[in-house]
Image (cartoon, grey):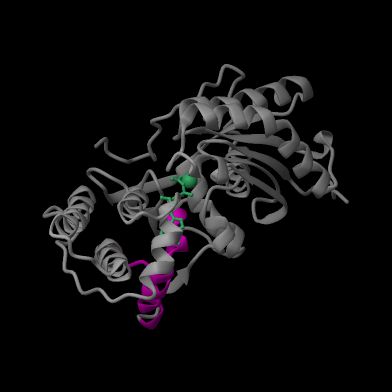
Amino acid sequence: MKKSKDIYILGIESSCDETAASVVKNGREIVSNVVLSQIDIHRLYGGVVPEIASRNHVEVVDRVVKLALSEANLKLTDLSAVAVTYGAGLVGALLVGVSYAKGLCQASGLPLVAVNHIEGHICANYLTYTDLQPPYTCLLTSGGHTAIVNVLDYDKYDVICSTVDDAVGEAFDKVARVLGLPYPGGPQIDKLAQTGQPVYKFHSVVTSNGNFSYSGLKTAVINLVHNAEQKGESLNNADVAASFTVTAIDGLIERLGDVVKESNAKTVAVAGGVGANSYLRGKMEQFSSQGLRVCLPKLALCGDNAAMIASRGYYMYLNKQFATLSLNACPTLKLRGEKPK
Ligand code: KG4
Ligand code: ZN
């Protein structure tokens, strides 16, 4: 039952291969959260095929949104706004969610809120820790972005460092592919690495000016595997996965340690798909022993979902940051303050 002072935001997310809709109450409480993944379809091709993703979003978006509303036991008229991801992501996929949300707002008169997907990932923390408030330092680790960000306020970010080439999730997926593991590779590498030892040493992913570079690590793993193949030697894939994981994550943790010290942060959070990685989550404990509060989003909220979009939408709604019905998708959208590569 809706109380008049409560604010319910419908979130819609379709930036990649998940069609998702969710209703969130007052920015913090998930009332419904529907995520329809296309992973099984894209696995056949070893990665996301943009055109197939768009077509599938078109087929299911209406049902996914209706399900989110019915599971929340709410009608459109109970909502305060519709929040939709408009970037970053695949342009065709984004356009499905954006067009659907615009239609819904046109028909209902509800305000439209245009959400940056990356900012959404950060908000997954508010849904897990309902008392969490800025400022805090956030390690952003997704398939498309890798950065350390000081979250100064709900709407104010200071991007301290970021990747100069591939994102960490992208590196997980590419290394998985070379090891013959199915898409998406991150969870597969995670599982395999737990049975291996980090016997191979790779160069750090931290660059001389404190950013990250994953293309060198990716190439080093590919060369290791190909050289072994050419010599007819067999590698222990679990050891390769463990060695890659340790190098990929230790650099992030090392830089996070520097940033936390420099900014005198009291709280440190993680966001994005790689935030589900068990080695990374274990490593974050070192900040607890240093007396910091450590926030790790629930596993189900690390990957793409619409609850995080609705949570972000709530804070934009409070600031009356509304979009017009001429909203377009922005596939290369950056986090505010992020420098172009
Ligand atoms: O944040 P996300 O769901 O999508 C983007 O916005 O990009 O991140 C997806 C990425 C993929 O690269 C996936 O392989 C990776 O997150 N990932 C993981 C794990 N679960 C998902 N990487 C490492 N370990 C995991 N357990
Ligand atoms: Zn994402």
Residue 101 placement: quadrant = top right
Q: Write down the region rendered in magenta.
A: 260-289
In the rendered image, the residue lying farthest to the top is 326
Residue 256 placement: quadrant = bottom left
Q: Is residue 81 above or below residue 277?
A: above
Left or right of 209: which side holds 121?
A: right
Main SS, magenta residues: helix
In what quadrant of the picture does the C terminus appear? Answer: top left
- The answer to whether residue 84 is magenta is no
What residue appears at the point 24 percent right and 65 percent down from the top-left corner?
247
What residue appears at the point 41 percent right and 54 percent down from the top-left corner?
185
Residue 280 appears in the figure: no
The spot of residue 137 in percent (x, y) is 38, 60
- The answer to whether residue 272 is magenta is yes
Residue 319 appears in the figure: yes
What residue appears at the point 56 percent right and 45 percent down from the top-left corner?
40
The spot of residue 113 in percent (x, y) is 60, 32
Left or right of 84: which side holds 237?
A: left
Q: Please tell me which residue lies in front, 52 or 102.
A: 52
What residue appears at the point 61 percent right and 48 percent down from the top-left corner?
311
Residue 299 placement: quadrant = bottom right
